[in-house]
Structures are given as structure tokens and as C-alpha cells.
Image: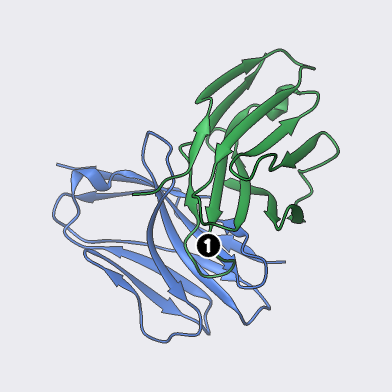
Chain colours: A green, B blue
Amino acid sequence: EPEVTQTPSHQVTQMGQEVILRCVPISNHLYFYWYRQILGQKVEFLVSFYNNEISEKSEIFDDQFSVERPDGSNFTLKIRSTKLEDSAMYFCASSLSRGGTEAFFGQGTRLTVV
Amino acid sequence: AQTVTQSQPEMSVQEAETVTLSCTYDTSESDYYLFWYKQPPSRQMILVIRQEAYKQQNATENRFSVNFQKAAKSFSLKISDSQLGDAAMYFCAYGSGNTGKLIFGQGTTLQVKP
């Protein structure tokens, strides 16, 4: 069964460093998303991406964040200068279309900022 | 803005019994979908069941069914014949038909007692 793959599974970084979280969505999917979940809290939408551009972003997704689909298969989330409060589980998701189709989630990347 | 509320932080059920998890939502959109996701300790997000808002018939998926009350903006999940493997965090989610992004509730931790 096709799946969304995220790497790394766990990343530890120093405050102020740049991190790139990587995702390989399901190959025929067209819509891509990043969500985050601070430990013990709900899952929050960060950004959606379609046709090589951001279609929607939340208030969390400020200038420190960026997304890219550099080669037609990978989908990356970059945090330019990490803060302690960026520590969270980051989930990538993809779907065939928007709206009611199932969004398939990756297994997540646990980001720890120290 | 759309909101999703899960008022039960924790629930417990005896193995083989039935449990209902509650969810309410608020929206002014007419095109939307509702989902229940399961998050086991591995923290992978797994789709349990989905409901199209334009359908009156309640969705069912094996032991899982929903009670969708559109006028009341209520979307509860019923788990029948509970199994130990059902123990997890359950998230109710609203999916916009326009944008595809998901808005999650706070989650309900379900404990299944043998």
C-alpha cells in the first residue's frame, strides 16, 4: 500500500539552527500539507501546497518557515532559525484532491530544539 | 472560522463493550467533510472513518460508526465490541471542501480495560 514517508524520524537541533524536514508524499497525490503537534496538544495546520505554490497557511507559519517541492517527489519544510517552542511532532500529509478525500499522514518527525 | 471541540479528554471502556466519543464543530461553510483519526502511541495518524456533510446516512466502517447530526453540528464516534488495540488518542477533524485543510479537535484518550 502506498504511504507517505518522512525523514528523519527524530531530529535534535540547537536553538537558532536551520532544520529541514523531508517528506515523500504518495506519488499521484497533488495536495500536500504540513501539520504540527506539540506534545500532549492537538494537531495544528501549518500550510497547504498545490501546483508548486502555497495555497493556504496558518498564523503559525511565519517568515521562519518555508516549504518546497524541489524535485517533484520530495516535499520539505524548512525552519530557518529554530526556537525552543518549535519543538513538536511535525506531520506531512498528502491527498489526491482537496476536500473530502482522505489525507494520508506520514509517521511524523519529532523535532527537539535544545 | 471553523472550530472543532471534543469535550471528553479521557474515556474508558471495558473490552467488548461499546463507547461513544463526542465531537461538535462550528462552520458557516456548506461544503465540508468530517473525520475521525486514531493516534496510537506510535503517534501515526490513522483515518478511522469519514463522513460527507451532504450525506444524511451515517458512515460505518466495521465496528466503527458515526452519529452525524448536521443541524446540531455534532459528529460522534461509536466503537462497538471494543478491543485492546482500540486504545489510542482519537481526534475529530473538520475538512474544508474548499481548501482541504483539516482542523482538529483537542483529542480524546481512550483506555480499553481487559
Q: Is residue A82 above or below residue B77?
A: above
Q: Is residue A83 left or right of residue B105?
A: right
> Is there any visible trace of residue A34 in the rendered image?
yes
From the image, which quarter does the N terminus of chain B lie in? bottom right
- Front-lying residue, A45 or B1: A45
Q: Position of residue B26 (x, y in %)?
A: 62, 71
Q: Position of residue A100 (x, y in %)?
A: 52, 70
Residue pictured at 76% horizontal, 43% vertical: A60
Q: Quadrant of residue B103?
A: bottom right
Q: Is residue B62 above or below residue A58?
A: below
Q: Is residue A54 above or below residue B80?
A: above
| SS class, disc 1 | loop
The amino acid on which the numbered mark 1 sits, given as a three-letter code, is: Leu
Q: Is residue A76 left or right of residue B113?
A: right
Residue pictured at 70% horizontal, 24% vertical: A19
Q: Residue furthest right?
A: A63
Q: How many marks?
A: 1
Q: Quadrant of residue B99?
A: bottom right
Q: Which residue is mark 1?
A: A96
Q: Is residue B34 above or below residue B54?
A: above
From the image, which quarter does the C terminus of chain B lie in? top left
